[in-house]
Image (cartoon, coloured by chain):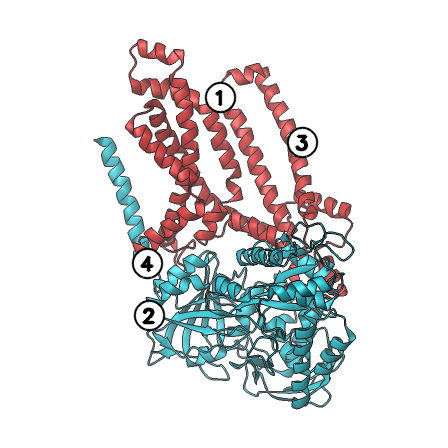
Chain colours: A red, B cyan
Amino acid sequence: MRGRRDYLLGKLIRYGFTLFLILSLNFALPRMMPGDPIINLLGENALHNDPEMIELLRAEHGLDQPIHIQYIRYLCQLTEINLGYSIHKNLSVVELLTSSLFWTVLLVFPSDVFGSLLALLCGSLAGFKINSRADYLLTAIALSLYTCPAFLLAMLFLSLFAFHLGLFPLGNLTSGGKEGIDYLLDVVWHLSLPVAALSLLGGASKFLVVRNSVMQISDQQFVVAARAKGLTEGRILNKHIIRNVLPPFISMVALSFGFMVSGALIIEIVFSLNGMGTLIYDAVLARDYPVMQGCFFILTIFVLFANFAADMLYAIADPRIGRSS
Amino acid sequence: MMRISKLTALALVFLSLCLTGMATAAQTEESGSGDRIAKLTIGTINQINDANPWDYYFGVYSMMLSHQGLVRFNKNGDLDPELATSWETEDLQKWTFHLRDNATWHDGKPVTAQDFKFTVDYDLEKDPLSKSYIGTIESVEAPDDKTVIINLVKPDYNFLTTISVVKTIPEHIFKSVDDPKKFNDLEAAIGCGPYKFESFDKDAGIVTYQANENYWGGMPAIDTIQLRMFKNPDAMMLAFQKGEIDLPYYYSKGISYYYVPKLLDNDDIGIEVYPERGITNVLWFNTAVSPFDDKELRQALSYALDYEELRNMFTAGYGTTPSAGWIPDGTLYFTETRTLAQDLNLSGTMLDSLGFKDVDGDGLREMPDGDKFQPKLLTRSDLPDSVRAAEMLEKYFAQAGVDIQIDLADKSTHGEILDEKKTHEMALAGTTFWGMMMGESYGSGYTDTRYYGWSMVSDPEYQSLVDDLGKTQDTEERKELAAEIQSYYAEEMPQFAVYSMNIIQPYNARLEGWEYNPLHGILSYGTLFNLHRA
């Protein structure tokens, strides 16, 4: 019991230090990039770059302060969950993040769940029935999807199911002007295609890992012993093999959940969705420091939390981990 | 058996969800009373962040639909009266505008000269960026409700162009607003134009405008205009082909030529090709740094490019190559100058005479002092056509023995180098119609160091031509000055065109009365009032 508590405490301290380090990097990295948010803001409409005007704009966004003052202000703002105002979009970063994060979670969470379940089911089947017709077929499909660029698959889906068959809309999150249950159904209808595309793309890579893990474990002595005891093939797979596949699978799924909040840029662009992917992409292109910092802050929290959860689940899935620590 | 029935039930639920969604899909409406259009849906990839006139693209669409300035561009690229019915100036420094009597804000209050004075003062006070285009205004006076007097710090013939993009805002709404960029209230979108902003559904990506029944110019031809935003041009073009949108629209440019063959098969789609008043890709030299301060080197390099191949490759027959005088054909007082064409022999001879010779026998020329000649070509990495054009230039220059180095930079870095640091040697970048009108027009905003100055020209001879353009009202004199500026470009070549793509604009052919203007394209004032069912 004490071992488990020490293990947990040690992890918490390490995670706290990592958080501080990453937050500092989040501040430094955007400012180390070439490019200037204010010059970017001027754009084509500016007749000329008056130095006084540029200084006024810098002051408006606090960029005229020495770098250490900006850093201290950034840390203070973080403690108040005040992430500032977007330089480029003129909106509060918290407001931007709340909206984008909500839609991203709605898009990526079901995709991760469906993709992971699909990978676990098909990967176990293919790995357990290695070199069978089912294995060849599933592996061929998974490899095709794995090597298919996300943009191509998404455009194929859009062209086939939305344009030619007319089963789904050509993009966006809703049709607009709906309320209540109609609105919910409309959102499900709009998200069906992107979720399907993202599930297949995410499932394909996990499939290959699960298949190979199951294949390796199937050769081990305890599986032979289980078979010798007369257990059914289904029971051997479900009770003995999949249990051993779980730790690397959990680690993979946890990581994908962690990075979930970075969005799915390509899918968001193809299906015209407002999510974290496009928010981060636009912020990086425009050197929008407050938005970049806000997005990376949320990303950091999610990744650390997902890793922490994976560590905890490891200890449950494999009790030896906690004890040895 | 149990498992199969569960799967079937799940599939049925999914199918019913899809059908429910399909049954409620939005449809474009054309039917209205008589020839009126009930709803026009415009697809765009321009992204509006909020219904705030200080948001860049919302501001652009406000200027077309809901807000007005003193004057506006017409289909010929000239300026027509808008809120001002007439104007006069004697010295190009003091401008007097007379406003129309019957203009009202969307909330019914009258538009007054005081509103315009407030707009300029407020913009200058609250938005530092406004100094970049109205910074030359010294003061604005409103002696009565319908007269605006604008005093400039110096004479400026081109002032009408500059003031055309200033959208008037209502004083009674904004006088109590301290930070307009954060004022995202419905009232922020109140204007005095032919359309009233109604709503912005961010999740659906739809901005809705309704016709303003009290507009001083009468009811526009379309009852409802919806902007539907896409992040992906391919999805937008699919929606257009499917009839979900009536017009795919990009602010200040057309669609890519590779959509055209598919669209030509569709009888419900019409396509117009308009000449571009900007230039899609220009090769800029930093004339302030050696060796590009030598006009003969710039001329020698201009003979190295195969303009015909570039035009075919990047415009598929929908483009042109502006002549050495750089100003696009169709611009007021355009004059013919040398046609740009490849002549590798002449290029080589000129480079030889300048001392750029291959000394070490590697097929590439060295500088006159024997150092390697490897000029950098700054190019936008996020524009695929620019990257490909840079690679083609690398090939052409290599044929002339010049080993250029492509320097890729994203939009922000590219802008920082060209606009602020000026550390480039050569650069590829396009110009727009509005950009060509900047400064004293004729591309002076891009050329003259006193403005953007991408080619860093501070030659007194050139600056004197630009200044004279700003001071001269006489038509004949202006014509001469315009010709001299074009000759200057052809002779000095601080920059030259690589190729220019025309504007390809498809539209719903079941509607007629589309009108194009060089600033706003097909979404012009004329279209709003002339559109009707075919």
- Above or below, comparing residue A200 to residue B285 in the picture: above
Q: Are marks 3 and 2 on the same chain?
A: no
**Secondary structure of the residue carrying numbered label 2:** loop
Residue B19 position within the rendered picture, expressed as x and y whole percent measured from the top left: 29, 52
User: What amino acid type should be assigned to the residue bearing mark 3?
Assistant: Phe
Foreground residue among B524 and B347:
B347
- Quadrant of the image occupied by residue B81: bottom right
Q: Nearer the viewer, mark 3 or mark 2?
A: 2
Q: Are marks 2 and 1 on the same chain?
A: no
Residue A184 visible in image: no
Instruction: Please give the name of the residue rendered at 76% of the width and 55% of the height, measured from the top-left corner.
Output: A64
- Residue labelled with disc 2: B268
Q: Are marks 3 and 1 on the same chain?
A: yes
**Secondary structure of the residue carrying numbered label 1:** helix
Residue A154 position within the rendered picture, expressed as x and y whole percent measured from the top left: 41, 48
Residue A52 visible in image: yes
**Secondary structure of the residue carrying numbered label 4:** loop
- Above or below, comparing residue A17 to residue B270 in the picture: above
**Marked residue chain, label 2:** B
The answer to whether marks 2 and 1 mark residues whose Cβ atoms lie closer than 8 Å is no
**Horizontal side, residue A87 vs residue A196: left or right:** right
The CA distance from mark 4 to mark 2 is 24 Å
Instruction: Please give the name of the residue rendered at 50% of the width and 25% of the height, measured from the top-left corner.
Output: A313
- Residue labelled with disc 4: B24
- Residue labelled with disc 3: A17
- Residue labelled with disc 1: A316
